[in-house]
Amino acid sequence: MNKNLTKPPLLEFLEKIHQSVSVYTSGSPADYIPELAIVNPDQFGIALTTVDGITHSVGDSSVEFTIQSISKAFVYSLAIEKLGSDEVLKKIGVEPSGEAFNSIRLNDENRPFNPMVNSGAIACTGLICEYAKEDAFDVVIDFLSEFAGRKLSMCKNVFNSENLTGDRNRAIAWLLKNNKQFDYDVEKVLDLYFKQCSILVTAKDLSIMAATMSKNGFNPITKKRVISNEAVIKSMSIMVSSGMYDYSGEWTYRIGLPAKSGVGGGITAVLPSEFGLGVFSPPLDELGNSVRGIKVCQELSSHFKIHLLHSEDNAENCIRKLYDLSKIRSLHNRKPIDEKTLNLNGHKSSVIELGGNINLVQSDSLTRAISKMIDKDFIVISLEKVSEFTSGAVEILKAFLSKIDDKPQIIFCGLRNQDLIISEFYEDLSESADPEILQFDNLDRAIEWVENQIISICGENAEKGKGLQQIMSQPILQNLSSTELDSVKQNLELLEIESGKQIIALGQEADGIFLLLSGKVEIALDDGKYLATVSSGTCFGELALISPKEYRQANIFSTTSCSCAWISAENLNKIFSEFPAIKSKMLLNLSLILVDRLNKSNAKIALGT
Ligand code: GLN
């Protein structure tokens, strides 16, 4: 393989950022906790984990450092998950404080401003202590480990150092206890708080933890749900307004991603539904944020325009293809009279192929498109290429469908997709038990069903001319004189075939041709891949006309009981030697049949179906 292709461009981009940001040497590691001051300030790592579970890492991305304040975002989501947001809101506000992380001031209601400053985080830790009692630290570290997808540990030296010097945090904790923010032993609450800050992580861990937030609480590496999306969304909201201490306003203005930093030199940032980022570089600016960490996020955000409020204009693109059935058809080969019926009436039915993620506004635009087709008899809506329906989109579409009376008849395909929302959508639809709404697993089957309806409603009596007389109307026998037709009739054998029988096997010699007089057969490959349907009035096994030396290209099974007129290769030769003109007539007819099939395939190719 070309070596250049093995390195993803996104990783190359991160390497470039790592190099360009390395020149920034300002700031210094936190020193108010003595143990943090002895870190090597040159360490610098970046890691980015995508929601599909790939981590790109550069530099010192596997070096462990203490998580510090970044833990606050995760422990807050744990509190919401375990106690519910109403309970947590009673104790901790959600407004930016406009003050340093270690400010001792509370808001007018004597509550901490938010969970990302020390007072709010210690109050939150108090709630976890009340909830988990003596097991509180195990609950916290196990929870953070689930986010990181590996068992995390704690740095005892940093814990001891912080415990010995953390009098300001002690003062905050006593103030909170005095205000009845928690009803627990203050030293135990502080013990948990210092321990949670001393948990060791790497930039790579932080990127996976953030990617788990990005995927609304589902860890893309372990493929496990860690937490509800509600709790994650609440925590990310406060990361947007207060995650970067007193730099938060400017952070959101410039970078626009939910993020959290810690005095250990880490920053974690989330691009919802896309990736999580972890950066580690110990030197901090005067507000306590990693200097290089901020630069990396700034570069990434401005270069790729990933500010949360930056939106691409793609509202009306959910309809990928729109066509009627006058030219585009299913894989069912039908007799000429039915083809004619479809040619004349196909325009009365439409197919809408949807794709991508369907949101509220796209669903609205879809309902407007359908309401312009209200004169159609059938509308097939294909969701085969839809990756997600938001719940708002489902609600709008369901409300619209419930207003359709008897026309047009809506047929869905691809509803039973893996995706949760689409399958919920399917269940809701079936629950509404509207018999007018049908569903098929694949688009071709849905189109075939609509064609059958059109033929039975608009076509001439389908089985007219059943039996031997029908042979004369077979496309392959057109323009034969009556003597020539008699010779064919004398050389054929009538076969009755039960439903579910294999009539032709791939690789066999092409030992004859079948004219289907009644019933239906299906053509498929060895792996079961469906190729086409052939119904009465047309033929199959036509390769035998060209040469019996040819091998069958596919398997053919009867899907109903069938009657066939079978002409063996031997008899064909007999017919051709008696009436040489029959051979050229039949070959010309075969060419016309193939040209027709080719035209249909071309129409599909032109549409990209
Ligand atoms: N353990 C630290 C403290 O409370 C966490 C602060 C931080 O990372 N901003 O002082």
Image (cartoon, helix red, strand yellow):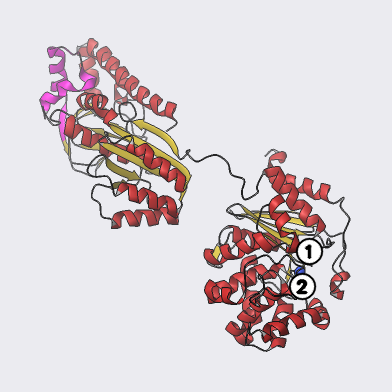
Q: Residue 121: percent from the left, percent from the top? A: 68, 74
Residue at which label 2 appears:
102
Q: Residue at x 83, y 80 (%)?
A: 165
Q: Is residue 576 magenta?
A: no
Magenta residues, as a range?
A: 468-495
Q: Nearer the viewer, mark 1 or mark 2?
A: 2
Q: Residue 154: percent from the left, percent from the top? A: 74, 76
Above-or-below relation of 308 to 219: above
Q: Quarter of the picture for ligand 1? A: bottom right
Check the image and name the residue furthest to the bottom: 185
Above-or-below relation of 370 to 144: above
Q: CA distance from mark 1 to mark 2?
A: 27 Å
Q: Is mark 2 within 8 Å of ligand 1?
A: yes
Task: Give the quadrant of the N terminus.
Answer: top right
Task: Give the quadrant of the C terminus.
Answer: top left
Residue at which label 1 appears:
63
